[in-house]
Amino acid sequence: MIILNKELFEKIVKQCEKELPYEACGILAGPPSCIGQNEEDSVRRVSKVYEMANADKSSATFFMDPKEQLKVMKEIRNNGLEMLGIYHSHVASEAYPSSHDIELSFYPEVSYVIVSLRDRHNPSMRSFKIKDGKIAEEEVRIK
């Protein structure tokens, strides 16, 4: 499960809307996750959102600039946090991992959060664990 407060949720949605017609992307960070008996039972509380530039400038894919990503990863570590997830938007499709998203899922321990802007008046957010090409949806709570 991944938990975001309403302010962070709104920040992500605003970035996604601002980046149109391109996909937006970023990194979610927070304190080390609380792991349950199984990895699937872990609780991730997001405390910081890092908006990243989509180096692809595409409406169908995203790619984070490696230098920017390294800088953010160092900041996360220096602040005693961990990367909890990677988010991006889908500008015209549902919030579900595409084949490209699955190819780029290099971190099986993090959540992959997708914001769909297909209905611009009602953006939706879903989160997934992706491991060895297998997709498992996880709960998203916005408090």
Image (spheres, helix red, strand yellow):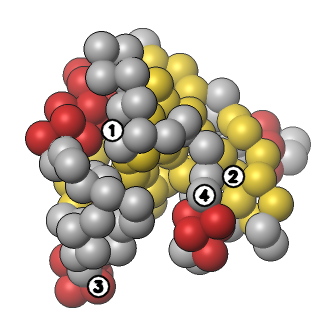
Q: What residue is drawn where x is 69% and y is 52%?
A: 129
Q: Where residue 1 sits: x, y (%)?
A: 64, 33
Q: CA distance from mark 3 to mark 4?
A: 21 Å
Q: CA distance from mark 4 to mark 1?
A: 27 Å
Q: CA distance from mark 1 to mark 2?
A: 19 Å
Q: Where residue 28 sits: x, y (%)?
A: 38, 50
Which residue lies under the disc numbered 1?
Answer: 47
Q: What residue is drawn where x is 78% and y is 46%?
A: 136
Q: The disc labelled 1 sits on which kind of residue?
A: Ser
Tell me the number on the disc at residue 79: none
Pointer 2: residues within 10 angstroms few (<14), some, or many (20+)?
A: many
Tell which tag, 3 or 1, sits nearer the viewer: 3
Is 11 rendered above or below residue 72? above
Q: Earlier in the sequence, mark 4 or mark 2?
A: 4
Query: Circle 1 — which element?
Result: loop
Query: Circle 3 — which element?
Result: helix
Q: The disc labelled 4 sits on which kind of residue?
A: Ser
Which residue lies under the disc numbered 4?
Answer: 98
Tell which tag, 3 or 4, sits nearer the viewer: 4
Pointer 1: residues within 10 angstroms few (<14), some, or many (20+)?
A: some
Tell me the number on the disc at residue 129: 2
Which residue lies under the disc numbered 3?
Answer: 66
Q: Earlier in the sequence, mark 3 or mark 4?
A: 3
